[in-house]
Image (cartoon, rainbow, N blue to C red):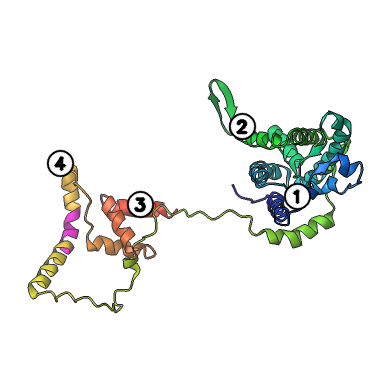
Amino acid sequence: MSFEHAPVSKGLMVSLAISSILVGVFDVKHYFHLQLVPHISRHYQYWRLGAHHLAFSNSSDLFIAEILLYNIGIPIERQFGTLKFASFAVVTTLLATLLELIFLILFHRTGLNYIPSGPATLIFSLIYQYHRIVPSAYSFRIFGLPLTNKGFTYVFALQLAIGYLPGSAAAALIGLLAGQIYRSDLANLKGYRIPPWLASFASQYILPLLGSLRPARRSNRALPDDLDSDNTRPQNDEVITTARQAPAPSPATQRSRGESTQAERSGAGGSVVREWVEGLTGRTQTGIRIPTEAEIAQLTTMFPDIQRSVLVGTLQRSPNIESAVETLLSSQQ
């Protein structure tokens, strides 16, 4: 799965990773969590309501969040569209911030005084949309319990929800509630869209910074490239070496090579008769067939872009030249 048609998801993942790393490097983690007493009630640090969504305080939460955003953010953005998905992220983040403040005020006497840093509410609101609109790809059973492929995503989300109890569980619950409110279309939240000037600014100045969103092109070749570098090396290159040169071939050796070459050429005409006789008698060749120079030259003329070693290998695996031609044509489709 690639980031094609999902630039907002990629932007969220990249910005979240950069901000979390910078927070850890400069040792300012204590400024990015939300705590009612004393930060909100006494010191009036209301900027923490928005700042605590910007970064995670540790690498394990960041890793889980990146996995969840990759697995659920991309399909949700492709379902919604980029503009609606960006508007959804803005609306649910603002709604979750308001709900967090209400939860802290109502339940701080029961022990809920701290909500960890990170956009956990946005992630869990995405999980709610993922649960409602994305179907499961397959199902299976473990000890009789029916499960689907979406269960692995929920396991990662559970780890994020129980990391800093009770604050992390409250953030998970608030995120699910914000996602449910958005989907119920209360107060016409689905109809909100970010301003056109902001969308234009992001497409012109922020989108180029994210790089390419298209997946890597896959080759459709059926035959692999030749890894033997000796075949691609020019034959007339001068080789400088300190080893002793091999003795020149004797006239008898040259005569025997010429006879073998002549025998291969003469065998091209008899290959058709041999195949016809073997078809009548029901006998087949044992081992790999040795192609003739005429067959190799014919294939080289028909397929000049394919290396000689690939042509020879195809002829060796084919009973005749017609089958080799069909194999090469099918591999180029």
Mark 1 → mark 4, Cα distance in angstroms? 84 Å
Residue annotated with mark 1? 29
Residue 259 quadrant? bottom left
- Which secondary structure class fits the magenta region best? helix
Residue annotated with mark 3? 326
Residue 89 quadrant? top right
Please name the amino acid that badge 3 sits on. Answer: Glu
Bin the neighbour count of mark 4 within 10 Å (Cα to Cα): few under 14, some 14-19, many 20 and up: few
Bin the neighbour count of mark 1 within 10 Å (Cα to Cα): few under 14, some 14-19, many 20 and up: some
In the image, 292 versus 152, the foreground residue is 152
Mark 4, secondary structure of its residue: helix
Residue annotated with mark 2? 151
Please name the amino acid that badge 4 sits on. Answer: Thr
Mark 1, secondary structure of its residue: helix
**Is residue 190 something that shows in the picture?**
no
Mark 2, secondary structure of its residue: helix
Please name the amino acid that badge 2 sits on. Answer: Gly
Q: Are marks 2 and 4 in contact (CB under 8 Å)?
A: no
Say whether residue 78 is left or right of residue 198.
Answer: left
Q: x%, y% of residue 266? A: 15, 62
Over which residues does the magenta segment extend? Answer: 265-271
| Image: 69 above or below 134 | below
Q: Earlier in the sequence, mark 1 or mark 2?
A: 1
Q: Nearer the viewer, mark 1 or mark 2?
A: 1
